[in-house]
Image (cartoon, rainbow, N blue to C red):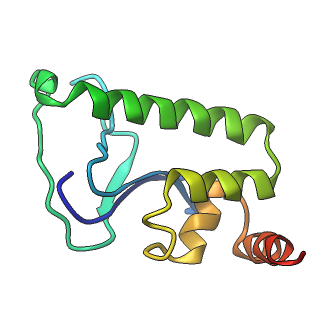
Amino acid sequence: MKSGLLRSYTIDKKGKEHIFLFASENWIMTDSTSTDQPSKLFIDALEDSEIAILEKGNEDKIELQKILNRLEALQNRVIMMMSSTAIERYEHFIKTYPKIIQRVPQRMIASYLGITPEALSKVKNKLLKP
């Protein structure tokens, strides 16, 4: 991705969105599926974005470092969701996405963290108190 901001997400059976990942400048975004299966994720541009689209089979054109960065972020996200408190997840979000914290609505951050917007507000208030 050259510029802008993307999100990938899924919608559950109740119609609720669950944000999987964000991608800003120099990140990659993909929904990896076999060629005969529908995509599992929706991908939206949250800002005007300039992207490069690679067809399946041309993955070797992606810089290896970008792939490794994305894999590390995914691994950290899974571990975080399994074993961290809401406060720790929010702190991790800030460290992982420092350039987009002000570019994303709070409801999307809450969705990414797996909490309600109200719970996110409480987390932020706890972090502000000495």
The image shows residue 32 at horizontal and vertical percentages of 32, 30
Quadrant of res 123: bottom right
Q: Residue furthest front?
A: 130
Left or right, 1 with reference to 86? left
Quadrant of res 94: bottom right
Note whether 2 is above or below 28 in the view shown.
below
Identify the residue at image location x=73%, y=61%. 115
Identify the residue at image location x=40%, y=40%. 40
Front-most of residues 76 and 98: 98
The image shows residue 68 at horizontal and vertical percentages of 37, 27
Q: Residue furthest right?
A: 130
Q: Quadrant of the C terminus?
A: bottom right
Note whether 66 is above or below 22 in the view shown.
above
Residue 114 in view here: no
Note whether 79 is above or below 3 in the view shown.
above
Residue 94 in view here: yes
The image shows residue 101 at horizontal and vertical percentages of 51, 69
Left or right, 31 with reference to 22? left
Identify the residue at image location x=21%, y=62%. 3
Identify the residue at image location x=20%, y=30%. 63
